[in-house]
Amino acid sequence: MNPSSTLRRLAPILALVAIVCAAPAPARATTPVTSPHGSLKAECSLCHGAKGWAPAEISKEFDHAAYGFGLEGAHRSAACTACHRSLEFAQAETACASCHLDPHRGELGVACEQCHTPRSFLDRAAMTRRHQETRFPLMGAHLAADCRHCHEPQQAGGLQFVALPSLCQSCHLSEYQAAKSPDHAGGGFSLQCESCHRPFRWDTASFDHAASGFPLTGAHRTTACTSCHVGGVYAGTSTDCFSCHQDAYAAAANPNHALAGYSTLCEQCHQTSAWTPAAFNHNTTNFPLTGAHLGAACVSCHVGDVYAGTGTACVSCHQSDYDATTSPIHSAAAFPVTCASCHTTSNWNSNFLEHDSLYFPIYSGAHRGRWSDCAECHTQPSSFASFSCIGCHPHSDQQNTDGHHASVSSYQYLSAACYACHPQGRT
């Protein structure tokens, strides 16, 4: 068939089709669309995708903070329906208590954010910081303690926070009653646990003994408590040294304390740094120790361990020295037994310096260094009132001496006359 003739035959039909297609489509009835989200004004594509209207897929472009509640911490991963119970999103409350059941029974108010954070409802760091603002700031082991140890669950539900006692014993009474080393209850220990214990280490006690009126010093610092607190008795323990050291007093033999009638005031001789050696303060007696007496053994004066009533006169100890002295012979010359007249505690063989002021200058002036023994002048051992100026002088030449005194009317060649005219040894 000729193609041209075919087109001529179909032309009317094609024209009709063209007219039909060009005519406007009949109008269809439309139903208004109502958003299930109420007043929410946002592009549907922020939550719904082309793959399916449900379930919703929240786009990263959706900014929850733009609607007055930014999502932080655990809120970022929470299901929308956890807070939005209905599709009317504007009806959702922003207060924590609207979603979170209050375990505190209203005792702490509804401002949950004071202790809790979106990071975690049990954010210990935030709760600890808040706790520091209370009348019981957390320290030491309390920082890591479970809240329920002190804030115990109640029968009505929740934990108790208000009107809790802050005394240690309110939580630690069982430890107090169970303590046996030492026995707290039996020993009458105070219930003020903080006087010995610290919140850092409950098992390491450190009692302030000074507060009891008996500060620990020296060896007392390392002494076991039971050494003084026998039988676990602490209250009313005597602070007298003798109450603990009576056995040491009775056993002392050098010197014998009991035999010598020593005072039981141990602190007069002993120190807490060491019980021995003892150091009696002799200055508290009527015979303070000076000079060589400071290093003398006690038994040198206290013979036979006799202390009470020991004589304080020098001769009571130095009688043998007095009797044995030959230069000069004290006993033959009837020297007085008041040893201190010539001797000192620093040097028993010291010079009789008072000779210059009381009698004649022999340690000063022209006679200084001109003699070596008392007998050079005191030629009669039995009498030191006697002396000779002539025997040891150039004046032993009487003729020469007489010549020098020819013009002296009262001159006599006698030692007594020499002293009468020259009492200070000067010409």
Image (cartoon, rainbow, N blue to C red):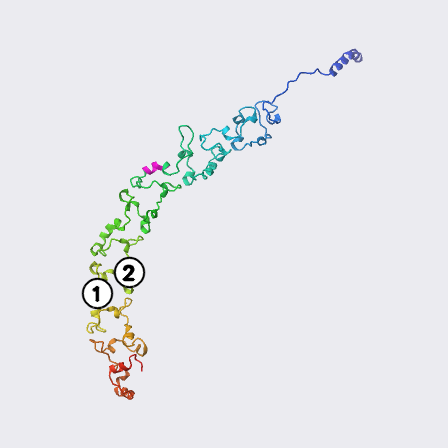
Q: Tell me if 230 is positioned left or right of 89 in this view.
A: left
- As measured in the structure, the alpha-carbon distance from the residue carrying label 1 to the one carrying label 2 is 19 Å
In the image, which is nearer the foreground, mark 1 or mark 2?
2
What's the residue type where badge 1 is placed?
Ser
Mark 1 and mark 2 in contact? Answer it, CB < 8 Å.
Answer: no
Residue ID at (27%, 51%): 241
Q: Which mark is residue 308?
A: none
Q: Is residue 269 visible?
A: no
Label 1 belongs to which residue?
316
Point out residue 396 in the picture as x, y percentages from the top left corner. Answer: 26, 84
Crowding around mark 1 (Cα neighbors within 10 Å: few <14, some 14 to 19, many 20+) is few
What's the residue type where badge 2 is placed?
Asn
* Pick the front one: 206 or 19: 206
Residue ID at (25%, 76%): 374
Label 2 belongs to which residue?
283
Crowding around mark 2 (Cα neighbors within 10 Å: few <14, some 14 to 19, many 20+) is few
